[in-house]
Amino acid sequence: MKELSYLNKYLWKYKYHLALGILFIIISNIFQIIPAQIVRYALDLVGDNILIYKSFQSLSLQQDMYAVFAITVLIYGGIILLLALLRGAFLFMVRQTIIVMSRLIEYDLKNEVYAHYQSLPLSFYRKNNTGDLMNRISEDVSKVRMYLGPSIMYGLSLITLFAMLIPYMFSINVELTLYALIPLPILSVSIYYVNNIINHKSEEIQISQSGLSTYVQEAFSGIRVLKSFNRENDSIEKFTDESNDYKQKSLSLTKVQSLFFPLIMALIGLSTILTIYAGSAQVIEGTLTFGNIAEFIIYVNLLTWPVTSLGWISSIIQRAAASQKRLNEFLKTKSNIVTTEGLSVPIAGKIEFRNVNFVYPDSGIKALNDISFEVSPGQSLAIIGTTGSGKSTIANLVSRMYDATGGEIRVDDKLIKTYELTSLRSQIGYVPQDVFLFSDTIFNNIAFGSDKSDEEIVLQSAKDADVYDNIMEFPQGFNTHLGERGITLSGGQKQRVSIARAISRNPKILMLDDALSAVDTKTENTILNSMKKIMEGRTTIIISHRVSSAKLADKIVVLDDGQIIEQGTHDDLMDLNGSYKELYEKQMSAEETIET
């Protein structure tokens, strides 16, 4: 229960739900016990007076006595029916308190986990896969809810019923009570072990189903590749193998589940037989009545489900504890990206790197080594380099997705760590290398960058990114609904929509991380020319492997293996006759070859 103790704060938050639930459980159990006593009264009434009734045979008194019996039994029956209805009403109230409480806690816990996910740094997502994150917020929280709802409800029902019923049974007859209760511990232990087997096999089925779903998702996502390589039959065969594995595990579970109810019924039957056997002997001796035997049989049946649920509850608690442990691992993970002073002020856009080093925490790869440069407000900086040279790492450090492992990064002459995170990032427009668009309209994707969905801003941003005409060619224009990850658009169109999204927020710092890699040179020049006016008055960082993207920048930094090997203006670097000039001449000659 150590891991589950984390949930105590929620149980305290909804303490009134829990307290009312306990009260309603006690009342419903009272209405469950009383009918057995009424049955005893009814049977004893008939048993005690049946000889007197027979002795009045052929007399008018017999009919009068029968009428009294009939009315009395009818009254008893009406009382039992009324008690059943009242119990049903209070059971409804039990679910409206305890089960509702579990749903409210489930809602709060999911929100807490999701909010915590949002606060964690990028390094957390590099170490954990998406499937595991989703599983914890869905499957694990659902298992915890089973502990908070059904487990607590049936557990309290069992405790209160035993506390009220067992002492009462012993007060009637100790020997008969012991005979009635003998099979129940065996039943509980048996159910516990059978339930553990069922849970183990259910988990195997979940793993198999997850693998099957993953395979199907990959097959559908990569359907073009499958068809291009003519591998449909191989795909079907592999799906059949995965499906057969799922089928075998499901059949194995069904065999175990088929033992569940026969086991319960057998042990209930044994308890009933023992009760009748022991009770009959005492009826003959005159120490018990037939009504007592009937009452005890009803009590045995009342105790059966709570005892049966004991094994089930134990299993639920075990699974909930394991799930909560997994949740606690993430909830205890703290973000290492914290602010030191909480500055929330407008920035001018000056960026300065002083001897910055960076090592990725998850892989240990040194991405940057002694990087120093400065960009004044309103200036533009181009960062050129081959794949893996550390270009994107600089963008991640400016937006504080990571913190430098050495050196200093300053914004407006203040350490970047002094700024409040949301304030800093709200003033940065970032176009990532791996473009991600939401399954929403084009308008909403562009407006996502701005706090307000101003139509004029969205349209102008699309024009500045040179994607307005492409959008208007769609039948629904800006209301065109994009598929998953923006699959409706081409690679170049997705990049330009991403650029429009970044500039729609009118950022002080604009970062383009290889944002024009999917467009041709002509379109790239068109976009860059249209962005000249956008770059005015804001600091712009253009990260690219294309030299053509760097020509508009005021400064150029050439990276190689995480180090700056050259920096200066385009003309300065051309005069150096170094790596930049060599890269420039290669790319220019390649473009000329393509054009011819």
Image (cartoon, rainbow, N blue to C red):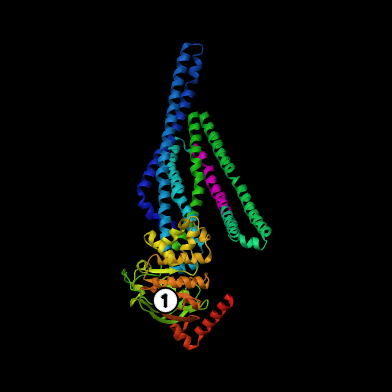
Disc 1: which residue: 404
Q: In the rendered image, which quarter is residue 235 located in? A: bottom right
Which residue ends up furthest to the front in the rendered image? 596
Vertical arrangement, residue 574 with respect to residue 417, above or below: below
Residue at the image position 51 percent from the left and 37 percent from the top: 301
Quadrant where the N terminus sits is bottom left
Task: Classify residue 216 as left or right of residue 173.
Answer: right
Vertical arrangement, residue 93 with respect to residue 211, above or below: above
Q: Position of residue 507 (x, y in %)?
A: 37, 69
Tag 1's secondary structure?
A: loop
Residue 179 colored in magenta in the image: yes
Residue at the image position 52 percent from the left and 33 percent from the top: 279
Q: In terms of depth relative to the viewer, which is nearer, 83 or 446? A: 446
Q: Position of residue 145 (x, y in %)?
A: 45, 51
Q: In the rendered image, which quarter is residue 72 located in? A: top left
Vertical arrangement, residue 580 with respect to residue 524, above or below: below
Q: In the rendered image, which quarter is residue 8 located in? A: bottom left
Task: Classify residue 238 as left or right of residue 166.
Answer: right
Residue at the image position 44 percent from the left and 21 percent from the top: 71
**Residue 275 in view of the camera:** yes
How many other residues sit within 10 Å of disc 1, few (<14), some (14-19) or many (≥20)?
many
Residue 154 colored in magenta in the image: no
Which region is colored magenta? 176-201
Task: Classify residue 271 as left or right of residue 10.
Answer: right
Which residue ends up furthest to the top in the rendered image? 59
Q: Position of residue 143 (x, y in %)?
A: 48, 53
Q: In terms of depth relative to the viewer, which is nearer, 233 or 106? A: 233
Q: Main secondary structure of the magenta part?
A: helix
Q: In terms of depth relative to the viewer, which is nearer, 270 or 316? A: 316
Q: Position of residue 107 (x, y in %)?
A: 42, 52
Mark 1: which amino acid? Ala
